[in-house]
Amino acid sequence: MIPEALAPYWQLLGTRFPEVEAVFAECMEEAQKCLSKAGIESYLECAAFLGKMGRGVEPQLTFLEEAPRMAVVAGESVMPAVRDFAFHLSCNTNGPAIVPFLQTLAPIAERLRSQELFSHYLEMIRDFAQRTSTSVHGGGKATIPSPSLPDLLMQIPRLLSIVTLDGLQNWINYGIRHYHDHPERQRDFFQMQSADAHAVIQRERHGCLFIDHERMLALYLHGFWQHDDRLIPYSLAFDELRKPMPYFDEAGFRIPDVYDEQAAVNGIDRYRLALAHMAGHRRWSQAMIADNWSPFQRIAVELFEDCRIDTLICRRYPGLRALILALHPQPDPAALLTTDKSTLRLRLAVVSRALLDRDYMAALADDTVMHFVERFDAVLNDGYGSSREMADLGLLFIARTRRETDFLPQIIFDDTEVDYRDDNRHLWMFIEAGEDEPEDEAPRDDAKEEEIPEGLPPRHYDEWDYVTQTYRPDWVSLYELLHPMGVASDIDRLLDKHAALAKRLKRLLDMVKPQERVRIRYQEEGSELDLDVALRSIIDYRSGAEPDPRINMSHRTDGRNIAVSLLLDLSESLSAPVKGSEQTLLELSREAVSLLAWSIEQLGDPLAIGGFHSNTRHDVRYMHLKGFSEHWDEQVKGRLAAMDSGYSTRMGAAMRHAAHYLKAQQTDKKLLLVLTDGEPADIDVKDGRMLIEDAHRAVQELDREGIYSYCINLDPSADEYVSDIFGKQYSIIDHVERLPERLPELFLSLTR
């Protein structure tokens, strides 16, 4: 329902789209804040025109949402030009590009910050559309749309954060010039999928390029720090979620491929400072075991150690102090008073600045900060100090200054980044339990041989927040343990119960079992002569018929090279009885998993089985039922026999943890099977979409790592959510009582 005050505007818009009516009040509220009275009239007239082009609701709806932000920086007078250009696209076969064009208006205008540059941008896109659209008659009006215009439009906001508008124009000209006659290669170029596209955009970037100063920096590192490590550049241009930081490892020093001037410090001096800081770490830092420290504690330890290194390099080369103070942020202490965001990073940045800048500390007049500065000075006055002493200061700082707001998901990042410092990966060592660890010399009880010790530190996993489109760092704490043992003979009885099914599966398994060598006949070129076909060809030749030239044969190895991880949802809902059956979902799942494990053992594929459940993000339990190196033996059967259910289903973290072990397998193919009876949920998450979106993000992450995820769902209502997570990679078992039969068959069909 349109409010009465907005009725005249609604009449001016003259649309009947219900989607527009639903958001019209919010759009007008933003427009009235941003636009003048004449601007609002132009805004509505342009939107009304776009709604009558015959392209559906999306152009009008997108314009209403994006135009006010665009007009604030580019000027209200550009709105008619935008309308006319959208109409031009519609009339010249490029209708599919209208919505991407309108969707990117606001971020492009905010990047250009000029009406003149924005008008130049419209001309550039118009020229691109004309040059890449074609006519089937070889001239005149285009009849085939540009194959890459929508792709280009979606890339431009990101590209303008890397290059100037002129650099973008040069990049576009290169793509058109070299791929005008190759539509598919043209699309790859403007989607940034080709190496050529990255190379050309790199050429158009500005600043102090590493490639131009590599020799100078190598000599600096050798002469000042006596290091001859290799300098390896990385790109800052194409990492949007997590900005990479400098670091060093056995291969060498990793630094950005370009540095611009910042805070009156030129790019080459920024390179020198970054290398000096890493060289200081290489000389004076010692690695520490981090398993029992929280992320907050590690951040604080890293900060005090970074300040120690900065102090020592300034003591060695005093000229670096001016660069450090210029590039180090000066946080505003007043921001520490906020109560709706986490201020941990800001508090640490304040302490870091105070440790390096005593004028800042004096103006701060904070007793806590002054106390830690005095203790820091006391350590370094006696010499170089040590990483262990800095660790003690960091742990004490976290203990004394901890606040409840530290755990809030919204974190203050402004004025906290010290970008010349590295990521400190060299400071940490982790002791992790693994399957390949050597056995202790002392005898152990066989039943406890692989037991994971109590108190093992949790693994922390990020979780995707679809509302803010960012990861919540180290949000989920996952504890892994070996599942308790049960009676192995119970599993043997289950297999005997399904003896007929096992016999049928055995026939199927024999069909897909790897064969050493397979003969490929009827080859014109091959490794040896196929005598049967050769004799037949001779007979045909002597009888006057056309002989078959395919008288050779070759061989190939028909082997399976696949690793499988089966992830079981062991939430409380598995205890529910199956309709029309005396068994529960848990009992049926136990039977199905036992048959599947037996089947995979016959094939020889590496298999791991894990179960999970959760009790808030602080307590996700991952229970190992079978490891990749274990065979189908009494211990594995015993764990399956004791399988139990409880709590909730935080699927994303469990999938990431299963993938942690799966991706370490040296196989060509990797399959993650997820067996669940419901959608992801947990008691500390009120938004039902949150964990669904996180699980979908986990599927995407696994896909990028070469792991194929597939869901087997026992929920009859799973159609409502399972495709949102796994796309088309799922099956729903409508008749749950047939799960022991369907699960092995599904596996065979996926891996045949």
Image (spheres, rainbow, N blue to C red):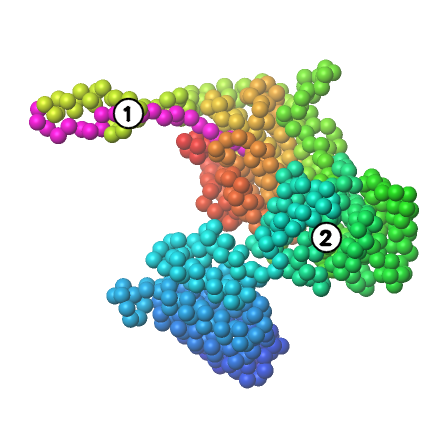
Q: Residues within 10 Å of mark 1 (few under 14, many from 20)?
A: some
> Which type of secondary structure does the marked residue at label 1 adopt?
strand
Q: Which residue is mark 1?
A: 553
Residue pictured at 36% horizontal, 56% vertical: 183
Q: Which residues are magenta?
A: 543-571
Kind of residue at badge 1: Met
Q: Nearer the viewer, residue 204 or 186?
A: 204
Q: Position of residue 603 (x, y in %)?
A: 46, 23
Residue 736 location in percent, x, y? 49, 35
Spatial CA distance of label 1 from label 2 is 65 Å
Q: Is residue 329 visible?
A: no
Mark 2 — residue?
Answer: 273
Disc 2 crowd, CA 10 A, few/some/many (<14, 14-19, 20+): many
Q: Is residue 569 magenta?
A: yes
Looking at the image, tell me whether mark 1 or mark 2 is earlier in sequence order: 2
Pick whichever, 28 or 743, lies toward us: 28
Q: What type is the residue that disc 2 sits on?
A: Leu
- Compared to residue 693, the image places residue 505 above or below, namely above
